[in-house]
Every structure is written in structure tokens, then in C-alpha cells.
Image (cartoon, grey):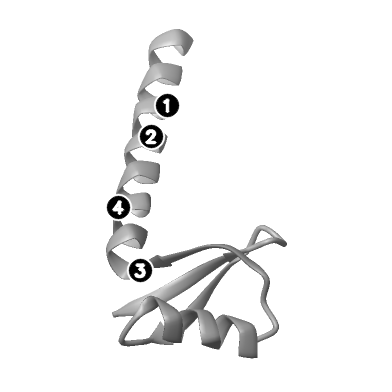
Amino acid sequence: MIYFALNHDGLAYNLGDHGDWEAADDTAISMKLEPSYLFDENEARSFAEFILQEIEQTKKAIEKVST
């Protein structure tokens, strides 16, 4: 499973493929990151889908108001 870290600097970092959360956290520490949140590839996909849906809905709402 691929893990990611949302760091305190506001950036997301790819921690790579790990067997569990603890291993991913160890990698974050070795990268000298201070993650606010660790998440796996499944959560990343969910976040991406949500963001894309929100962008599309916002664009449609703007189009309605603009016309």
C-alpha cells in the first residue's frame, strides 16, 4: 500500500510502498517530515474524487450565475 503524509508545511509527500502505518510513519520521520496526517492510497483516491467533483460542481454553478 502506498502511503502519503500531509506535512505541517501544507504539502503532501509520497512516502512510498509500506506494509503498515508504522513503517510509513518511520519513513516520514527519516525524511525529517512533521506530518499532520498520514493517509494511504485509498484515502488519496477518495480525496481526489471529492476534489474533482467539487471543482465540476463549482464550475457548473458559476456558469449558471454567469448566463
Q: Nearer the viewer, mark 4 or mark 3?
A: 3
Quarter of the image where one finds residue 58? top left
SS for callout 3: strand
* CA distance for labels 4 and 3: 10 Å
> Is residue 9 shown above or below 46?
below
Q: Nearer the viewer, mark 1 or mark 3?
A: 3
* CA distance for labels 1 and 2: 6 Å
| Location of residue 19 in the rendering, given as x and y in whole percent from the top left corner | 31, 87
The label number, if any, that marks residue 40 in the structure image: 3
What residue is disc 2 on? 54
What residue is disc 1 on? 58
Is 7 or 20 nearer to us in this picture? 20
User: Which of disc 2 and disc 4 is earlier in sequence?
Assistant: 4
Q: Nearer the viewer, mark 1 or mark 2?
A: 2
Query: Which amino acid lies under the numbered mark 3 shown in the image of this protein?
Result: Asp
* CA distance for labels 1 and 3: 27 Å
SS for callout 4: helix
SS for callout 2: helix
Residue in the picture at 38% in, 34% down: 54
